Image (cartoon, grey):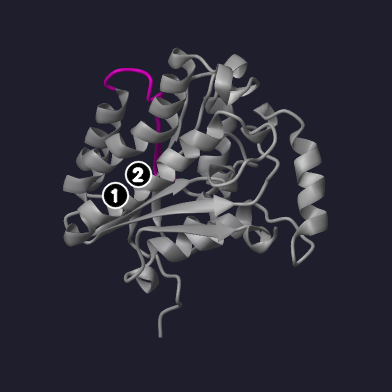
Amino acid sequence: MKPLVDLAGKRGLVIGIANENSIAAGCTRAFAHAGARLAATYLNEKARPFVEPVADAMGCEWIAPLDVREPGQLETLFEEVRTRWGGLDFLLHSIAFAPREDLHGRVTDCSAEGFALAMDVSCHSFIRMARLAEPLMREGGCLMCVTFYGSERVVEHYNLMGPVKAALESTSRYLAAELGPAGIRVHAISPGPIATRAASGIARFDELLERTAASVPVHERVDIDDVGALAAFLASSAARRITGTVIPVDAGEHIMG
């Protein structure tokens, strides 16, 4: 009998590894342990030295540059997927960005330009990836993005990213409905606070980590491997009847007041 989480032979594309401590790295490790064939992206040449060792350690077959703000890069990436693999079985979108001046200020005061950029990189890029992945997932597949509970309730200092993540979660539901007939499942994974490079841009994030450890039911914070375990399950055939969900992996924080 095969293990419950079996990704042997499945082709997965991971968007968003920043370094060995990033959520995408934890997911990549879980995908690799489940037997998946993997490719990953790096933002630019400055980021490559931090991403390449992680990708190599996880057995990624290849890596490619991707800055979704650069015209044509996303299309080039998916053409490479088609050329190398001929198809795709799952994708993880784990990227987000907001200009510092907009992220650190009130939502009330955010600029139109900053809001638009945050939405483009953090949300609309997932739609673009879904559109490009659809023809490569001829036998179905799974698309996953990473969100945070600041989407549904106010988290101090999360600011602009709250509305942006809310849009991402809603997007995942609509994509699930639209792509479901093609056998493509869509999920938003919602980890609790994790000390990543991306989180370091949020003011006083260390305080949030401390409060979380003290308040969650299991009295332990989640880590990137916890997120990876969930992502691997969702990408597998064991989750073939699950779609359109926002799934917390937060040590129970979402049930607390």
135 lies left or right of 73: left
Could you tell me the amino acid type at mark 1? Answer: Tyr
Please name whichever residue, 75 or 81, is drawn nearer the observer in this view of the structure: 75
Where residue 87 appears, as percent x and y from the top left, is 22, 49
**Is 148 or 45 nearer to us in this picture?**
148
Check residue 171 in the rendering and tell me which mark sits there, or answer none.
Answer: 2
Above or below, 210 relative to 109: below
Is residue 61 within the magenta segment? yes
Please name the residue shown 21% across and 41% down the image. 82
Q: Residues within 10 Å of mark 2 (few under 14, many from 20)?
A: many
Q: Classify residue 149 as left or right of residue 157.
A: left
Q: Nearer the viewer, residue 74 or 242?
A: 242
Which labelled disc corresponds to residue 174? 1
> In the figure, 24 relative to 99: above or below?
below
Cβ–Cβ below 8 Å for labels 1 and 2? yes
State the residue at coordinates (40%, 35%): 123
Q: How far from the left and from the top, in percent, is residue 126?
A: 35, 38
Q: Name the image quarter holding the N terminus.
A: bottom left
Q: Is residue 257 toward the left or the right of residue 107 in the image?
A: right
**Boundaries of the magenta span:** 60-72
Image quadrant in which the C terminus is located: bottom right
Magenta stretch: helix, strand or loop mostly? loop
Determine whether the residue tagged by mark 1 lies in a helix, strand or loop: helix
